[in-house]
Structures are given as structure tokens and as C-alpha cells.
Amino acid sequence: MSVLWSHGDAAAATGGQVTAPFNAAGLSIDTRSLQPGDLFVALKAARDGHDFVAQAFAKGAAAALVDHVPQGVTGPCLVVKDVLQGLVDLGAAGRARSKARVIGVTGSVGKTSTKEMLRDMFDAFGSVHAAEASFNNHWGVPITLARLPQDADFAVIEIGMNHPGEIAPLAALTRPHVAMITTVAPAHLEAFADIDAIAHEKAAIFSGLEPGGTAVYNADLPTSAILAKAAGPKALSFGTAGDLRLKSMRVTPSALVVEAQCGAATYLMRLADAGAHFGMNALGCLAVAQALDLDLALAAQALGRWRPPSGRGRRETVLLDPATDERLTLIDDAFNANPASMSAAIDVLAATTPGAKGRRIAILGDMLELGPDEVALHRGIAAHPALASVTLVHCVGPRMRALYDVLPPRMQGKYVETADELGAKAHGLVRPGDVVLVKGSKGSYVSRVVDALRHLGHPLPDDPNGE
């Protein structure tokens, strides 16, 4: 077993007291996913993690990070004054001892997808450690850093925010060698005065850069001047007029093909099953490679290994009838939504050709946390030019009623308050040859409609998950 944290190192990092020696191979905050040998961190969130320490030891935890030893627990404990601060201290120590080149990623849209692109890109150059899922908040970032193997060559840390003042301390903890902003878009407007305020908050990631570090930002935004000012003298931009310049981008039935120029050289990236909105993120990844003086041709090739994650634009085939080989194409973009990502997803749907007698169908759920303009922002989707190529739009949630009411009657599909109502009608929503986009904020639960559509199908012959 490789040791991530010995009791001595963990105690030195946190200033805590150890009740018995231990060596931990990993770190966990959830007994449901805990692996034998993990250090269990008893965070207090919706539930008090101290209530699960005994269960953690029963599942093989090596030790527990606690602020008191729970009654009846005899396993090794690292006792600190505050568990969250102890976790932050472990994260800081994990970062300090690492030899990895660290990349911090933030943005209103595309953080997690870009993190995964970078993971695949860096895999061509060495060992990579990256955040799990969307671990990008005040506990997710320190967890990722605390899990950082000492011998990793690269570390990709996702940094998110919901309110002002959240990014700077996480950037200071991460201390990235390269900090990247994917984009700035209307998201979390409930907590910010306007999009300029969001840009200033995103730009705070640059305040955590290591001395000599490089700021990477999107040059094609209305707020790019704010990002450029915060980036300072050592910066790389990407976009149609960036240092890494987008020469062309075209969507094909199977891939997004992106042509990028850096200096006199041109690089081609082919992203399978990806929509156009992923092209700019790939360009940003190439800018990160440039900042680290990596081989850009190899980096561009490696980016072709990436696929959109589940819920973030992944395209899949649902086999409706094996006897007649009747299929539909499902675009699962149900993890999150804001006006920018909604527009990009509709562009993907418009660029995807249905099968014979098939239609383009959009199933759209509420976009959350948009503030006082949420009704206008939902209604504004109707003005998107690409929506004209969509046959039917089904709307889910009270906010999406604003869109439904202004759609042309020929495009009005079903309107329901909840995703479960639409999921129950899944069999009547689609037919063979259709291309179906499902898009909405996580809290709209439109992922349940995705599940219902998948359940209409039969495993494909080459489906490794098939029975």
C-alpha cells in the first residue's frame, strides 16, 4: 500500500493530536465511497461526519480526522480543533510537498469539462492528478490537494464560486503555476450585481499564481478587458484574436474539428461527439500547454482522446428496437445550465442531423440562480436563431414557462412543472431517428428525463455495460 499520509505527516500539517499511529493510502469524506485504508474526514455539513466515524472504521478506514473522539470509537484518530480547517491544512501541506506543475481552472461554463480535457492532455506527458467530479468549493479544493500524490507530474484543480470572495482564498491555497478562465457568462447572478462583477470574481484566480506563473484567459468576451487587467504582464489569451488563435471550427456528425494557430504553426484538434462550445475550451487547454512549454502538436493530438462527460453534452445512441435497428440520438447535457451554455447546447442540436423521418427535439429545464432577470433570460431563448431548426420544445419547471409561452405554436411540445411528469411520458416524446437534447440546471432534475429515455432502449451489441 502506498502511503498518502502517515500519522506524523498529518499531525505536522494540522497541528492535531494522534491517538494511535496510522498510514493512510487515501482520503474520504463519505463512508459510501470510502475505500479501505482511507483517512476519513468527519466534516459537518448536512450531517455531522462524527456520526459516521464508527461506520468508516467498519469499512476499513485507516484513521479519522475529528474534533473529538466519538463515544465507542477505538480506531486511530487525528484530533484537531476544527475539521474543515484541518482538511484545509492537509490540502496546503499536500500542495507544498508536491513537485507537480499545478493548473487552476475556473469559469462560468466549462470548468469540469476543461479539467477533464486537461487530464487527458497531460496524460501524454506524465502522471496526472485532477479533481474528482466537481470538487471545486471550500472543501472540494482542499480535498483534491490533500489527495495529491507526491510524485504526480501535473495537478489540475477546479475552482468554483457561488458568491463574491470565494475564489481568492481557494486560489491562494492552490498556488497554481498556470491559472485559466474558460469564460465569463451570466451565472449565479443572484449573488452578483452584473456580469462585470462576475468577471472580477473569476479574475481573482490570478491572485494565487505562483511567482512567474501564467494567466490564461478567453479573449473573446465582453469582459475580457477586466480579465486582461487582472492577468498582468505574463499572460496568454485564446480566441479568435488571442495569442492562441482560433482559425476555424466546424461541427461534423461525429466530431468537432478545431484549427488553432500559435505563431506560424497550425494545430488541428478533433473532439469526438462534442459541440462547438467545447472548441474554445480545447483552445484554452492548448494555451495552457503553451504556458508550460509542452509540445503543442502532441498536446493537440492528446486532446482528441477526450469525450464529453455524462450530463455535459455527451452524445449517445439509444437502440429502440433491435429487430428493426430503430435508434435515436440522445444529447445528455442535463448537469447544469445558464444562458450561455443553453445557447451552445441548442447550437449542437441544430448541427446534429436526425435520421430518416427523425426530428430535432429539445427538452429544456429551468436555469437556476439567474437573479431578478431570470424570466427575461428564459424567454430570450426563443430568439436564438438555431432554435428555428428544432421541431418541438418540451419545457420543465416554472421558469421555463416563460419560454414555453413565447414559442411558436408549432414548436410547443409539452409543458410540465416537474421532470418526473415528463419522464413518465418519455415513451410518447420520441420516435426513431430523433435527435433529443436534454438540458437544464441540476436542480431542475431533467437528468431524470435522460434516465427515462435511456430506459426505452436496449443495450447495443458493442455496449460494454450491456447484459
Image (tube, rainbow, N blue to C red):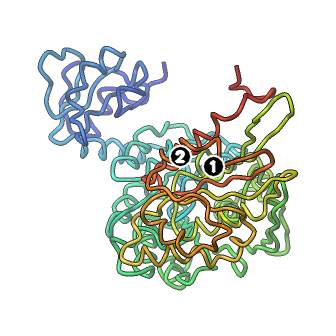
Apparent side of residue 258 relative to residue 290 in the rendered image (left or right) = right
| Residue 456 image-quadrant placement | top right
> In this figure, which residue is indicated by the disc labeled 2?
447
Which numbered disc, 1 or 2, marks the residue that appears first in the sequence? 1
**Residue 332 coordinates in the image, percent (x, y):** 63, 49
Q: Nearer the viewer, residue 102 or 427?
A: 427
**Crowd rating for badge 1 (residues with CA inside 10 Å; few <14, some 14–19, many 20+):** many
Q: Nearer the viewer, residue 67 or 91?
A: 67
Q: Which mark is residue 51?
A: none
Q: Where, by quadrant of the figure, is residue 75 drawn?
A: top left
What is the C-alpha distance between the residues marked 1 and 2? Answer: 8 Å
Q: Do the residues labelled 1 and 2 touch (CB within 8 Å)?
A: yes
Q: Is residue 342 visible?
A: yes
In the image, residue 408 lies at what x, y percent?
64, 74
Residue at (37, 73) in percent of width and height: 371
The amino acid type found where label 1 is placed reads: Asp
x%, y% of residue 115?
Answer: 58, 52
